[in-house]
Every structure is written in C-alpha cells, then in structure tokens.
Image (cartoon, helix red, strand yellow):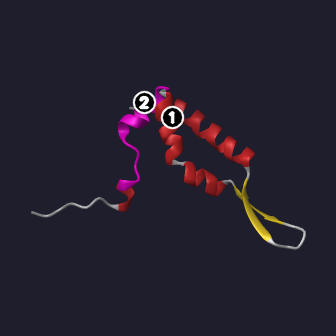
C-alpha cells in the first residue's frame, strides 16, 4: 500500500469550513484567517530604516499592517462561496 504525501501547497491551505464561516462573518474564523496570513502581512509591512550612523534597522510599519489586515477582512466578508 502506497502512502500519499501531501504536497507543500496542500499543507498550507485553510480548510473550506473556515473560509465559509469567515465569509459569513464568524469572528473566530476571520481571526483564524488573519492568523494564517499574519507572517505574509508582516513581511509586506516590514520597512528598512537607517539610524544616524547609517546602521540598518528593520521594523514593522504598524499603520500599513493594520491597513492590510483591514483590506483582508473586507475581502473576506465580500467573498461569495459558491
């Protein structure tokens, strides 16, 4: 009997019931979706800053992070499950 291994993409997918519940406005499901995309949102909102001596520092732009989260929530609620 052969074992079927999940591909890398299948491991990282959100379950359908969570997507459906989030699109219907379930707060815990929306939080699950936000948690799933948290790393990607942080990566997108990371900015490179330089101090007085020219040292590079990376920080998260909180305003941009919140805007991305708000946009994701808006799209989740507008999503129609067929």
- Above or below residue 33? Residue 20 is above
Q: Residues within 10 Å of mark 1 (few under 14, many from 20)?
A: many
Q: Earlier in the sequence, mark 2 or mark 1?
A: 2
Left or right for 55, reference 9: right
What's the residue at 37%, 42% (across, down)? 15
Q: Is residue 39 left or right of residue 29?
A: right
Q: Quadrant of residue 54?
A: bottom right
Identify whether 62 is placed above or below 2: above
Disc 1, SS: helix
User: Residue 24 placed where, x, y %?
Assistant: 46, 26
Q: Residue furthest right?
A: 52
Q: Is residue 39 left or right of residue 82?
A: right
- Residue under label 1, please give it: 30
Q: Quadrant of the N terminus?
A: bottom left
Q: Quadrant of residue 9?
A: bottom left
Q: Give the percent coordinates (x, y) of residue 68.
A: 65, 44
Residue 47: x, y in percent? 74, 59
Q: CA distance from mark 2 to mark 1?
A: 8 Å
Q: Find the magenta span and give its range.
A: 11-25
**Residue 7, percent from left and from top:** 33, 61
- Per the image, the residue denoted by label 2 is 21
Residue 12 badge? none
Disc 2 packing (10 Å; few <14; some 14–19; many ≥20): some
Main secondary structure type of the part rendered in magenta = helix
Which residue is pictured at 68% across the width and 53% down the height? 45
Cβ–Cβ under 8 Å for marks 2 and 1 = no
Residue visible at 41% across and 53% down? 12
SS at mark 2? helix
């Amino acid at each position: 009997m052969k074992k079927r291994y999940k591909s890398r993409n299948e491991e990282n997918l959100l379950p359908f019931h969570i997507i459906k519940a989030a699109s219907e406005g379930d707060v815990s499901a929306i939080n699950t979706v936000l948690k799933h995309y948290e790393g990607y949102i942080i990566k997108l909102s990371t900015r490179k800053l330089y101090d007085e001596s020219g040292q590079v520092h990376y920080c998260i732009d909180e305003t941009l992070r919140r805007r991305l989260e708000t946009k994701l929530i808006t799209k989740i609620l507008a999503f129609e499950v067929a």
